[in-house]
Image (cartoon, rainbow, N blue to C red):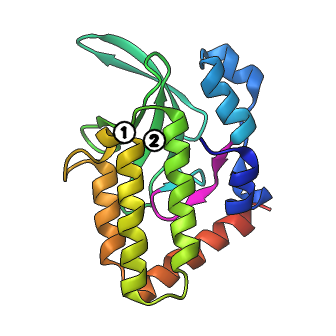
Amino acid sequence: MVTHEEMVEAFGTDGILLMDAHRLREIGVSDEDARILCEVGLPVRSDEAFTTLLEDEPSVGSVIVFKTSKGDFDVLVLGGTAERWGMRYFLDLGKGHVGLLSLGEEPQTGRANTSLAVFVEFLHRLRLRQEAVNGEEEDVSRRHTERLRLSLEELDPRALGSAESWWSMVMDNLMKRDFIEETRAFLQQRRAEVARS
């Protein structure tokens, strides 16, 4: 899986968020997930699919208790999606998978990735794709996106297992981008990285 050095190379020193190990232990994050969050880090932003720069609640690092008919479970908010999607990514502290919470009148949850390590790898590869297609023709962008989709399917088949899955929708959105939309997304990425410094 991705290392801190690879994350810094892709996102820059100021483009990485590292969490506090003591706090993560207090709330019950597993040792492996705490290592990832404290030593590898989360990107401040990864294209439009992920951001830690949230303007409203729940914020990054918040713990939420979901009450279900099968019992309660705690989750740690990792970040969110672009404003237009208005969702939050969370780490299920009991099961270790990364899910999505849609914010609205009737919040709903779904699974995004089978583990935090895989989730961070997805975000890293998404950034590498973004760098590779910056300034390229649309057909080059589509080829990079298709290669990305195949590599992500291999890494976490369940995450792209249906056309309605979150990551399938992200890939479909990337395939439809034209040159101007791609450039705009790249510039938003750079602004987010610079704003953190």
As displayed, is residue 49 above or below residue 92?
A: below
Q: Kindly indicate the quadrant of the structure image that contains residue 100.
A: top left
Whether residue 128 can be seen here: yes
Give the number of the disc on residue 101. 1
Q: Furthest residue to the top?
A: 71
What residue lies at 60% left-to-right and 18% top-to-bottom? 30
For residue 22, above or below residue 186: above
* Residue 75 in the image, given as x and y percentages of width and height: 48, 25
Q: Which residues are magenta?
A: 41-49
Q: CA distance from mark 1 to mark 2?
A: 6 Å
State the residue position of label 2.
Answer: 89
User: Which of 191 and 33 lies nearest the eye of the viewer?
Assistant: 33
Whether 47 is among the magenta residues is yes
Q: Residue at x 37, y 63 (%)?
A: 84
Left or right of 57? Residue 166 is left
Q: Is residue 99 left or right of residue 106?
A: right
At label 2, which amino acid type do we have?
A: Tyr
Which one is in front, 45 or 150?
A: 150
SS category of the residue bearing label 1: strand
Please say if the residues under marks 1 and 2 sit with CB atoms less than 8 Å apart.
Answer: yes
- Amino acid on which the number 1 mark rests in the picture: Leu
